[in-house]
Structures are given as C-alpha cells and as structure tokens.
C-alpha cells in the first residue's frame, strides 16, 4: 500500500504566505480551463500570463517568443540560472466534465492539464518575487506554446530564446496527472518516449462499387496494412522497453457506392532509443510497400512524418536533488521502474543549452477520492477503474488540490538550486 501522505511542512522561506494566495491561482486555473486555445493560438492565455506577471511585479516579460510564447526573467543577485517551464496549449477535444468552469469554446478543452501548469508557474513566480531574501540567482519562467503538436519548444529555440535570455544551468518542468495530490513520480535517465506521427497515403484506383474488379481498392489495402503493422509491433514487444505503434485514424471514401482512389492512415510510433526508432521506421516502410505491391497499388505509398517529440531524459544527479526537495516539502516521491510511453518536447531546451534537466509528474486529484481499492490499483501500476486520464473528455484536475500541489512541487524543486548564500536573511 502507498503510505499516508506526509503532512505539509509549515510555510517558511519561499513558501511563506502561499496559502493566502492559492485561491487566486485556483481562479486563474478555472479561467484558463474555461478558455482553451490550440497550439500557436494561445493569445488570450499569453495575455493572462503577462497581466498576472505585471501584477506580481519585478519580472521582465517578453511576449511572442516562438510566436505565442511568453518568457519572463527575475534577477536576484549572483547565483545559478534556473529555467521553469509550463506549456499553455489545449486540445481539439469536446469537454464532458460537467464542471461549472467547463470550456466555453466548442470542441476545445484543456484535457491535458496545461492550464494547471500555467497557474502553478504563476504562483511560483509570485512566491519568488515576494521573498527575494530567501534565494539567490536568476529565474527564467518559460510559458511555452504548442507542446501538444511537438513544435513549441523548437519554435522558441528558433526564435533565439537561448540567446535573448539568460542561458539555463538547469531546466525544470512538471506535468499533472490522475494521481492523488501530493504524489510525485519521475526517474533518472529516460523518462518519456520519443514519438513520431506518421501519415501513410495509399494509392489505388477508384471505381463504382458494383464493379470492384475494375478497381484497386485502397480501403482493403489500408485494412491489410493496419493488421500487418500490428504484427510488426507485436514482434518487437520483447524489447525492453518495447516500442509502441498505433494506427489512430483511417480516412478514405465519401459514400457507400464508390470505391475511392486513396486511403490515409495516421500512425503514432513511440520508441526509447534511436536504433529501435530507425528499425521500426524501416519496418513500417517495408510492410506498407509490400502490401501495396501485393494488391497492385497504382503508385508507391507516401510516408511522411509530421509531428515528432524527442526522448525525455532526466539528469540523474539533478533528479535525485528534485526528489529530495519535493519530499522535504511534503510530497511522496516515487521513482518509476521504467520510462513512460507518453511524450514531451520539454527536453529540447536543455539539449540545446547543454545543461541538465528534470521533468516530473505530480498528482492533481483529491486524495479523498482514492479508497483502499484505488490505492491498491496504483500499487499495481494501474489506475482505478473509471479514472479519467489525460486527453480524455472527462479529465480535469481538482482546482483546489492540483494547483496547490503544482505550486509547492515546482517551488521546492527550484529552491533546491536557488538556496540563499550563507549569512543571508530570508525576507
């Protein structure tokens, strides 16, 4: 069984006064949740971030970094440069939570918790500005666009974020999930998979449905390709961790009585090392070409990659420091045995800067919702039946628990690098 969560330590140093300000950050979260914006469309969200930072005071804020991103700097004497990153974009998902602050944007939803990340980082920014005597160094708050499509971090790098702002000595980030608030999970080394989204276009020859002998049916071809690809994935299952290959969409045709000319598959590939990635990509090409040839395709299929995420790798020493810091701040830290199959573009910043980074996941659900059976499920490495996960139309972190946890965890992680120098007096 997971042991009881330790009580939160008293508010001291950077955390002093946090409880009094949490209702505001919870309201910021609810407002962001009600107004989701897709990748590179986060203009309202960015404006809210700029407004909150101005109200906090002391932060040097720059807008439109990487199109819709926001970067803000707080300098507080000599010391390390720490980057804190939160992503801002939402998903094309129709919300079904029934919350009073549910999305007012049809077909759009903060189904992955990025609204929590933004509110939590803003809360951290307030604590840092309020207590300059409790830390030393420079903090760069990075509010990143377009994480969901894997292009946001790259857009900010291409816009010169490393040259325009103090270069990081460490980059820290976090992600909320359907665990009890107070739980933090991460691991040294590979934490999250690399991912590639692939578009496969198959070319047949259309005809009337009454004359299939005159056609090369791309739908039949596509169905065969899907099954072949699942065999390819199954054959690679003994690899540890094993790659994952999913066909998430199949598009072809418009009406029942017409055999179309083309079919399109959208595939998601997740791998944990470069060699396996190349092996699977080569296998996909081999399977698709062979099936198309076997069915008499009118031309060679096209396979293109349109979204890619790098492998997320945590620096071991920095990860140990973060786990110790969040544990001292009252969290229950857990080291994962294996990498997660989800993906992130967070790692691009530290890779480009040549510095360590740490990414961790934290619970955003009310601990009171987890009975003994639910806790036992977590111990087995599964979620309780009926639990809504990230990207579900039913997923929404607890406004009261998730924001508080996000502020406390990220603040503690940052403070482990920004400790005051000997002889300094905390504000």
Image (cartoon, grey):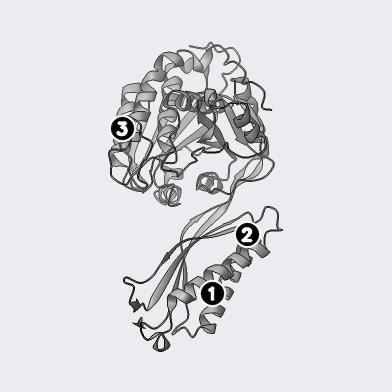
Q: Position of residue 345 (x, y in %)?
A: 50, 48
Q: CA distance from mark 3 to mark 1?
A: 47 Å
Residue 322 visible somewhere in the drawing = no
Circle 1 Cα neighbour tier, 10 Å, few/some/many (<14 / 14–19 / ≥20): many
Q: Position of residue 249 (x, y in %)?
A: 44, 61
| Total numbered labels | 3
To which residue does mark 1 refer? 288
332 sits left or right of 399 in the view: right
Residues 402 and 56: in front is 402
> Does 300 sit above or below residue 80?
below
Q: Nearer the viewer, mark 3 or mark 1?
A: 1
Whether pointer 2 and pointer 3 mark residues with C-beta atoms closer than 8 Å, the reply is: no
Q: Image point 66% across, 56% down: which residue?
A: 242
To which residue does mark 2 refer? 274
Q: Image point 41% across, 13% down: which residue?
A: 20
Q: Position of residue 423 (x, y in %)?
A: 59, 12
Circle 2 Cα neighbour tier, 10 Å, few/some/many (<14 / 14–19 / ≥20): few
Q: Which SS class for mark 2?
A: helix
> Does 223 sit above or below residue 272?
below
Q: Image point 34% across, 37% down: which residue?
A: 62
Whether pointer 2 and pointer 1 mark residues with C-beta atoms closer than 8 Å, the reply is: no
164 sits left or right of 359 in the view: left
416 sits left or right of 154 in the view: right
Q: Position of residue 226 (x, y in %)?
A: 53, 68
Earlier sequence position, callout 3 versus callout 1: 3
Q: Nearer the viewer, mark 2 or mark 1?
A: 1
Q: Which SS class for mark 3?
A: helix
Residues 311 and 111: in front is 111
Q: Which labelled disc corresponds to residue 48?
A: 3
Which of the 4 image quarters holds residue 239? Answer: bottom right
């Amino acid at each position: 069984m997971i042991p009881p969560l330790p009580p939160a330590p008293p508010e001291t140093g950077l955390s002093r006064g946090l409880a009094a300000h949490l209702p505001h950050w919870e309201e910021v979260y609810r407002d962001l949740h009600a107004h989701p914006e897709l990748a590179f469309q986060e203009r309202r969200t960015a404006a809210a971030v700029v407004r909150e930072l101005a109200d906090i005071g002391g932060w040097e804020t720059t807008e439109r970094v990487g199109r819709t991103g926001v970067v803000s700097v707080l300098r507080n004497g000599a010391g390390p440069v720490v980057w804190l990153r939160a992503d801002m974009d939402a998903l094309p998902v129709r919300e079904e939570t029934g919350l009073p602050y549910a999305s007012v944007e049809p077909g759009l939803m903060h189904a992955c918790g990025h609204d929590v990340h933004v509110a939590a980082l803003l809360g951290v920014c307030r604590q840092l500005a309020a207590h300059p005597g409790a830390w030393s160094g420079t903090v760069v708050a990075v509010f990143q666009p377009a994480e969901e499509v894997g292009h946001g971090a790259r857009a900010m790098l291409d816009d010169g974020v490393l040259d325009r702002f103090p270069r990081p000595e460490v980059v820290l980030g976090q992600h909320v999930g359907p665990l009890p608030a107070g739980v933090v999970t991460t691991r040294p080394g590979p934490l999250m998979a690399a991912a590639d989204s692939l578009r496969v276009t198959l070319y047949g020859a259309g005809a009337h449905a009454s004359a299939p002998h005159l056609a090369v049916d791309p739908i039949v071809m596509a169905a065969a390709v899907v099954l072949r690809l699942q065999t390819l994935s199954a054959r690679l299952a003994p690899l540890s961790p094993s790659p994952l290959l999913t066909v998430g969409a199949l598009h072809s045709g418009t009406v029942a009585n017409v055999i179309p000319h083309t079919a399109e598959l959208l595939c998601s590939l997740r791998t944990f090392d470069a060699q396996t990635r190349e092996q699977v990509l080569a296998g996909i090409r081999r399977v698709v070409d062979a099936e198309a040839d076997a069915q008499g395709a009118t031309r060679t299929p096209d396979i293109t990659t349109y979204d890619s995420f790098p492998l997320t790798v945590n620096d071991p020493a920095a990860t140990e420091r973060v786990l110790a810091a969040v544990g001292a701040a009252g969290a229950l830290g857990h080291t994962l045995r294996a990498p997660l199959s989800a993906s992130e573009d967070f790692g691009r910043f530290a890779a480009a800067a040549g510095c360590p980074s740490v990414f961790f996941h934290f619970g955003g659900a009310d601990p009171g919702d987890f009975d003994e059976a639910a806790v036992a499920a977590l111990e087995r490495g599964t979620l309780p039946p009926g639990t809504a996960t990230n990207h579900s139309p039913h997923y929404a972190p607890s406004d009261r628990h998730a924001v508080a946890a996000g502020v406390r965890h990220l603040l503690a992680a940052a403070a482990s690098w920004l400790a005051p120098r000997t002889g300094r007096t905390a504000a």
